Image (tube, grey):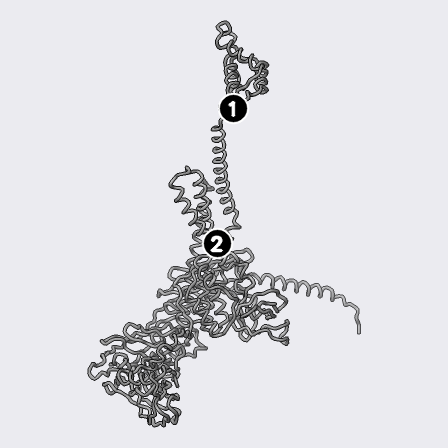
Amino acid sequence: MNLKPTPYRLPAFCLLLAGLMAFLATGALAKEPKVSATIEPDAIQPGGFALFVITIEEGNADEASPLVLPANVELAHPLPSTGRPQSGGRFQYASTITWQITSDVPGTHTIPAQELHINGVPFKTNATKLVVRDDPDAGNQLEPLMTLETAKRQIYVGEVIPVTVNLYAHRQTFVRRIGLIELPKDNFAIQRFPTQPNESVITIGNVPYRAYAYQSTLSALKPGKFKLGPATAEVILDIPSSAREPFLHPLLNQMEPRKLRPSCNEIEIQVTPLPEEGRPKDFKGVVGDFEITMTADPKSLNVGDPISVDITITGTGNFDALMMPNMVEQNDWKLYPPKRYNTESPNEPSDTSGQHIGFSQVIVPKAPLKNIPPFEFSFFSPIKKQYVTLRTKPVAIQVKGVAPSTPAAAAASAASTGGVPSVGKLPDELEKVPTVKPMVTDILTVMPSQASLLAARPALWRSQRFLVANAAAFGLLALLIIGKILTQWLRERRNLTDAATRKLWRDLHARGLSREQFYTLATRYAEARQLTGEQIAPILEHHEKYSFSPGAAETGREPITPVEKSSVLATLRSAPVLQA
Amino acid sequence: MFRHFLFLFAAFVLASTALAQEESAQTRYADAKGAFDKGDFQGAQKMAEKMLAQGQLSREAFQLLGNAHYRLGHLGEASLFFRRANLFPPVEPEVKQNLAHIRDRTGHVSFPRSAFREQYAGFLGRTQWFITAVCAAWVAIGSFVLAIFLRRHSPLRVGLAFVRVLAVIVAVLAGFGWYWRPSFERIEKVAIITVPDTKAYTAATVTAGTVSALPPGSEIRRLEDRGIWSYVEIPGEDQNRRGWVQNAAFEPLWPYQRGYLE
């Protein structure tokens, strides 16, 4: 192979290189960022949501600028989200900033061009338009419906009836969340609606709907004519934003999330009071229709042995008001307090078709007996519209042994036959009734309506200000006390017997004294201290001379010389005191 | 002049920020309570936890979290948050009853404490007790000093002596209240078991012998941390026991700043 360079290879290579550089330069020039704005969808219902998207090709915004919106258009969420758009499963070199916007005012709203900076250079998007269309037909067709149903419109006080709230959502919509179903409870006791509904699909007027049925029960609290409802619930669902294509599959259509409170009907309910006529004495407000059965075990036993009696009540009605049925003949029995238990409860609160409740009670025969007397209870039957007293059948048993003949038992027997027997309280056991012990089965959820925020603060005794303030106050008090003590001390000192002498001595040291004044003071001092001795005499003489001799008056007015003063003071200091 | 304006502006900004924070906390608490009332216990828990995470601590939020955790079946956490709520005055009977109910359900163990002391000290916070004690002490000192300055036979002296005795009694009682209130130092090492089926072992391995079962809500005191295990003190009927417990099984009673307890 000939590898020698041909003469045209070098220019061809240079040409290729130049072409490549030109291509790269063109590519570099093409990388200038492009900014555009879009709204998806561009038309919404009032209260609907749309996405305002700014797409930046070949660049990233320096920082998220605040969005400039016209009046009547507002942000659904204050913060934007950023991302990278996908094209054919691959990320482009582009970024997006997305805001969720909403508007309640129908019309066309122009969103102005938005300015943002890319690498410090300002760029502007195009202006966009958001159409808010109030299309009642489209909206109504797709908005959910809510209905309220009760089994009866005329009920008795205390009668329990099922109540159902149905929510119908159009098949073209997608239900995200259904809030708690609420009903006004002014005149009715309404059991809480379940959070999970029964779902089904129905067609109303050729329109397919998904039906969500929430079932519960209610009972009237007082007689009268009352309105029940309307039921309310907050529903969040995705509705196709384009009303033109409502029957496209949801996946193919643009969906728009909406928060709605569907309207609901009211029901007028006539509540009748329970009749006074025929009301049994032991009636305790139980309304419904019930059946009663009883079992007992053992059936063969001795006097004093316990028998466990189980009574089951089945039916429909306000089971909460049910109590243990009473034994008809209690004289020969000792009865212990009954216990209530639920045997089987249907899952749905409104399913009153097969409710059961059980009571168990321990009874003790006090004498040989052949059967357990019936138990009975009374209720009002809304079906029969009259009071009914149900009674169990007597249960045959065999009790062996003899009746106790102790005085206490006899007294008990006498008491039982003479008056109304008391359940589980024989006279000899009256003092043994145990105290009721609390049996808490759940927490208390009573909470304050407002929260008081806690504040973190340093310990007071570590606070410099606190310490300084206290130290200052303490110092002030200490000064006051010291001042008081000093004053006291000075006062006491002033009141001492030699106080006058000490004052004279201080006066003797005063400056500018004349001879006459000085010797007068010196004489007084010598007298006060009862000084004696020869050295005192000249002082007394000088005092006589300067105070009383007319010839020495002039000299007496002259100031005393320091030498003379110190000499006299030294004499006074050293002079002996006259001994008593 | 400009300085004064700057100071006033700063004070206004601080006051308005505090007000806004208080308002936002109230809104959050109301939302969380609303969610709890509607049966959204998980939502209520998240909202209340967000409050705490943002430093908006409140006794009511602790109580709400206790209730939400109980409803969600987390008895250990419920006990923990009720105990945290119980650290602040006034002592809520609901919180005490709920704690007792959880103890009945789980059988958890706690360090012995005097109900009287807890009840008494729970009337006020530590700082309030301290201020009461200090004020009473100053009244006693002040009345003593005043008596010094009065004449010996002044009738006021008797009154002052009465005030002095009263103030000393108040100071001592407030001192007890302050001392009996749980301080950070006293509960710093206390932790609550939150994980069911927790056991204390004789060594830092699950194959070691067991010391005691620790039902959720049990109190322990950490003595030493070693990796994922802690050597702890466990309350006992006759005497406290010691053992090793995995760190993941408990939460500290007070993981927040010490200043909140003052």
Mark whose residue sits in front, 1 or 2: 1
User: How many discs mark residues in the rendered view?
Assistant: 2
x%, y% of residue B140?
45, 46
Left or right of residue A23: residue A491: left
Residue B259 on image: x %, y %: 51, 56
Q: Which residue is nearer to you in this view: A476 or A4?
A: A476
Q: Amino acid at mark 1?
A: Arg
Q: Quadrant of the N terminus of chain A?
A: bottom right
Which amino acid, mark 2? Gly
The chain letter for the residue carrying disc 1 is: A
- Discs 1, 2: same chain: no
Using a 10 Å C-alpha cutoff, classify the residue at mark 1 as few (fewer than 14 neighbours), some (14 to 19) or many (20 or more). Answer: some
Q: Which residue is mark 1?
A: A502
- Quarter of the image for residue A137 reads bottom left
- Chain letter for mark 2, please: B
Residue contact between numbered discs 1 and 2, judged by CB atoms under 8 Å: no
Q: Where is residue A521? Give x, y as percent.
A: 50, 17
Q: Examine the rendered structure and indicate whether residue A98 appears above or below residue A230.
A: above
Which residue corresponds to mark 2? B175
Between residue B54 and residue A365, name the one nearer to us: A365
